[in-house]
């Protein structure tokens, strides 16, 4: 299959490793780490995100607003030292799935790699840049561009776990995404599955070969959507968004859920 380049946010060169975490650390112990991470985060990118107006979606299928309301609190904003993207909460223990390229430039401290995570505030409020939660990088699959991170602090009570789907959607089936395109946080889009691409191969600007079963969709995806969930009509995760094909307008891709299950099976989160 021909190699296709996909447009995504800039990436780094590190690789996440398996690291088991016992549970949330005491908040007082994490204060120095938070201070160091704040200094390392991409401040200009974050300033644009937290000052921009929220996007209101219109003209979507009848079930779409329900899917958005039920799932939006399980979609998070993630920032490493150089990249900002999206992630999805998949367990009550604080496990989150995102793209490997988003966490590759994670902040290194205490023998681990760390990123900042924001959940959607209540009542449509804008998130506060300083009110992030710390998360450790647990494992990454560079070839499939997937990463597993885990919160080191308790998720807010409003957080929603989004279930993983059991099968890949059929061509023609409606799918939905929630992410952070450019400065529009927690934006919702929808489309249909255009094709399923087994053993799809692609490269980013870093030149690293990638390969996975990919779901091709017409659901619009932009920079900042990367790492977010592709949801089916039941609101289950059927893929993780990776990007768009620059040579074909309206062609977008997500890594199929089977690879997510393989990633999480390494730490026995899924059967």
Image: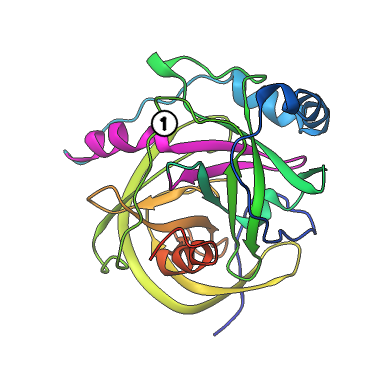
The residue beneath circle 1 is: 159
Is residue 180 something that shows in the picture?
Answer: no
Say above or below: 238 vs 123: below
Secondary structure of the residue carrying tag 1 is: loop
Residue 60 position in % (x across, y down): 25, 38
Residue at 59% x, 41% y is 23
Say above or below: 22 vs 166: above
- Find the residue positioned furthest to the left: 62
Label 1: few (<14), some or many (≥20) within 10 Å?
A: many
Say above or below: 218 vs 159: below
Identify the magenta region. Answer: 63-91
Q: Is residue 71 magenta?
A: yes
Quadrant where the C terminus is found in the figure: bottom left
Residue at 68% x, 56% y is 19
Residue at 72% x, 50% y is 10
Residue at 75% x, 23% y is 31
Residue 214 position in % (x across, y down): 45, 69
Q: On the picture, is 240 further left or further right than 246? A: left
Q: On the picture, is 196 further left or further right than 186? A: left
* Front-most of residues 18 and 41: 18
* Front-most of residues 147 and 177: 147
Q: Is residue 193 magenta?
A: no
Quadrant where the N terminus is found in the figure: bottom right
Q: How many marks?
A: 1
* Front-most of residues 65 and 91: 91
> Which quarter of the picture shows residue 257?
bottom left
């Amino acid at each position: 299959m021909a190699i296709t380049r996909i447009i995504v946010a800039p990436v780094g060169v590190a690789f996440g490793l398996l690291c088991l975490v016992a549970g949330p650390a005491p908040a007082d112990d994490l204060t120095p780490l938070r201070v160091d991470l704040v200094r390392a985060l991409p401040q200009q990118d974050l300033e644009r995100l937290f000052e921009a107006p929220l996007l209101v979606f219109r003209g979507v299928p009848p079930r779409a607003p329900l899917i958005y309301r039920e799932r939006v609190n399980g979609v998070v904003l993630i920032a490493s030292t150089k990249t900002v993207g999206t992630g999805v909460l998949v367990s009550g223990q604080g496990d989150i799935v995102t793209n490997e390229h988003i966490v590759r430039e994670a902040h290194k401290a205490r023998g681990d790699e760390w990123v900042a995570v924001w959940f959607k505030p209540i009542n449509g409020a804008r998130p506060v840049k300083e009110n992030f939660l710390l998360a450790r990088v647990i494992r990454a699959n560079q070839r499939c561009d997937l990463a597993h991170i885990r919160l080191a602090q308790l998720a807010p009570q409003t957080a929603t776990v989004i279930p993983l789907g059991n099968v890949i959607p059929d061509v023609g089936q409606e799918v939905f995404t929630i992410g952070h395109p450019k400065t529009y946080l927690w934006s919702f889009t929808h489309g249909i599955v255009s094709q399923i691409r087994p053993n799809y191969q692609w490269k980013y600007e870093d030149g690293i070969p990638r390969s996975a079963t990919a779901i091709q969709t017409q659901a619009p995806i932009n920079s900042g959507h990367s790492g977010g969930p592709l949801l089916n009509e039941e609101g289950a995760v059927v893929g993780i968004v990776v990007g768009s094909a620059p040579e074909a307008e309206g062609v977008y891709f997500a890594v199929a859920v089977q690879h997510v299950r393989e990633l999480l099976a390494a730490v026995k989160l899924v059967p």
